[in-house]
């Protein structure tokens, strides 16, 4: 059975958070960081040209960063595949490149394989959030 959280096309950030069952846009950021094993920034934005909500994603390389804007409607799979193209433009991340050794080659994965990887990354996000909540008490 396919996990539809990642394939459902949503119209805005709130729907994305509800479908994936995460708390905030920071969880999308953390999901992408775990997936690509590199710093990623995600913010909600507004595309004046299209009069639509969008996500602004900044993927960090060793010496530079590339920002992209993704307009809704979109799915998590669409977002991840688009970000993967940016990641592929960079060298491996870290002083010796070893930080990205464990990151999957997202562009080479079939959708069902990518969904499995996303499930694992989402589990890491939830564990990270539980650890973070425990420290703030």
Image (cartoon, rainbow, N blue to C red):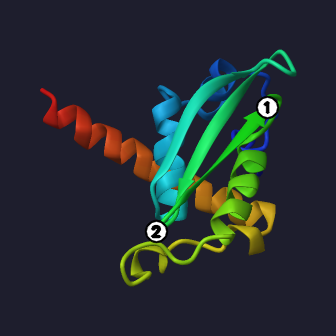
Q: Position of residue 93 (x, y in %)?
A: 47, 72
Q: Is residue 18 visible?
A: yes
**Residue situated in front as seen by the camera: 31 or 8:** 31
Kindly check if marks 1 and 2 are in contact, taking CB atoms under 8 A apart as contact: no
The mark nearer the N terminus, 1 or 2, is 2
Q: Is residue 74 above or below residue 111?
A: above
Quickly name the residue at label 2: 62
Which dot marks residue 71? 1
Seen at 75% across and 56% down, the residue is 81
**Residue situated in front as seen by the camera: 79 or 39:** 39
Q: Position of residue 130 (x, y in %)?
A: 29, 38
- Residue 103 shown left or right of residue 113 in the figure: left
Q: Secondary structure at mark 2?
A: loop
Q: Is residue 41 above or below residue 120?
A: above
For the residues carrying marks 1 and 2, which lies nearer the camera in this image?
A: 2
Seen at 48% across and 74% down, the residue is 100
Q: Position of residue 41 (x, y in %)?
A: 50, 43
Q: Is residue 120 visible?
A: no
Which image quarter holds the C terminus?
top left
Seen at 36% across and 78% down, the residue is 95
Label 1 – label 2 distance at C-alpha: 27 Å
Name, please, the residue furthest toward the right.
50
Q: Position of residue 112 (x, y in %)?
A: 76, 62
**Residue situated in front as seen by the camera: 98 or 22:** 98
Residue 87 position by quadrant:
bottom right
Count all numbered tags in the image, as a single digit: 2
Residue 15 position by quadrant:
top right
> Label 2: few (<14), some or many (≥20) within 10 Å?
some
């Amino acid at each position: 059975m396919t996990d539809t959280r990642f394939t459902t096309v949503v119209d805005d950030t709130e729907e994305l958070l509800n479908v994936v069952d995460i708390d905030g846009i920071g969880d999308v950021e953390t999901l992408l960081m775990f997936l690509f094993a590199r710093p990623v920034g995600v913010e909600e934005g507004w595309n004046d040209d299209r009069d639509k909500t969008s996500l602004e994603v900044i993927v960090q390389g060793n010496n530079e960063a590339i920002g992209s804007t993704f307009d809704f409607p979109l799915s998590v799979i669409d977002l991840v595949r688009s970000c993967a193209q940016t990641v592929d433009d960079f060298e491996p991340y870290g002083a010796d490149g070893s930080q990205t050794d464990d990151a999957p080659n997202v562009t080479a994965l079939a959708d069902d394989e990518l969904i499995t990887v996303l499930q694992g990354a989402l589990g890491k996000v939830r564990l990270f959030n539980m650890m973070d909540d425990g420290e703030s008490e």
